[in-house]
Image (spheres, rainbow, N blue to C red):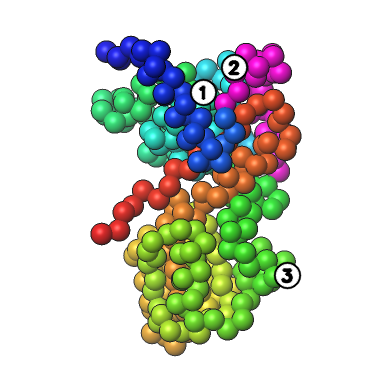
Amino acid sequence: MAQKKTPRRLFLSRSGAVLGSFALGIPPTRPRSKVQEENPQKTIRAVIDEIILKMTGAPMMNTVDTVKIGDSEQPVTGIACTCMATCKVIQKTAELGYNFIITHEPTFFSHRDQTDWLAENSVYQYKKALLEEHNIVVWRCHDYIHHMQPDGIETGVLERFAWNEYQMPGKSNIFKLPYTPLTDIVAHIKSAFNIPCLRVVGDPHMTCQTVGIMVGAAGGRTQIAFAEHEQPDVLVCGEINEWETCEYIRDAIIAGQKKALIVMGHVNSEELGMKWMSDWLQTWLPGVPVGFVPASDPFIYI
């Protein structure tokens, strides 16, 4: 049974939520009555519909971008944009007084969020109960944001690379740098994205010029086709199957090609795209608190 909060404990918990929001770059939650005064009929479903109307190629018939849980007909009190709707993200969303999470990736551990196989799973039950306790709606925005022109996720991530002046004409994710040692490119990515460790295939002292960036998990065939067609010296990926792209790059090196692979990790490579979405929503969705709640890299490095 949940312990009843005393007035002092309630004050401290609310104060912590406000302070935490500043740390995450999120405006403090306004009183719920104020939000409802400004948006008396604005439901979560209405917000989703407005977002979709602004997307390229909308509406999509076969998409994973659906409501995963919750009553979307309720008035929206605030929106948390995140790469992954983890339990920590759900808790932070509840602390902020928000009732709507827009997540880029699945909530229930598979691409289409099927839950029949999880019915008796203790972690699924905990997460579902946590969302239901706080009456939070989760909607996935994966296909739509990737189909924006330009790709919204890619836009947010590439801004952090800060290589705009080196972008090749007509190729949003390929950059022609001054000749640079691979170690310097690795150091730049680690510093820019605050990643303590990166996995690299190739000669660390190789001098590189062209860099191709593929965020998220494009898949081995797509990554390999990109490497062959575009011939970047360095391929920067979010997530790989180790027996596909990794081994292709190793064999390419043995075959005499100048190649290297840098693996950032899935969340590290896409998270800033959802910060971009948070900023974008704030430009045209007045009266609704919107913030970015990072899921962060799930790995520690020992």
Q: Residue drawn at (62%, 64%), measured in percent from left and top?
A: 162
Q: Main secondary structure of the magenta part?
A: helix
Closer-to-camera residue (277/111):
277
Q: Is residue 16 visible?
A: yes
Closer-to-camera residue (76/218):
76
Image location (x, y in percent) of residue 232:
55, 75
Reading the chain from its start, which is encountered first: label 1 or label 3?
1
Which of pointers 2 and 3 indicates the residue nearer the eye? 2
Q: Residue drawn at (44%, 88%), measured in percent from left and top?
A: 256
In the rendered image, the vertical position of residue 298 relative to residue 138, given as above or below: below
Q: Which residues are magenta?
A: 29-56
Q: Amino acid at mark 3?
A: Pro
Q: Amino acid at mark 1?
A: Gly
Image location (x, y in percent) of residue 21:
52, 35
Mark 2 lies on a secondary structure that is helix
Q: Quadrant of the N terminus?
A: top left
Closer-to-camera residue (36/198):
36
Image location (x, y in percent) of residue 149:
71, 51
Residue sitting at the far front: 8
Reading the chain from its start, which is encountered first: label 1 or label 2?
2
Q: Quadrant of residue 61?
A: top right
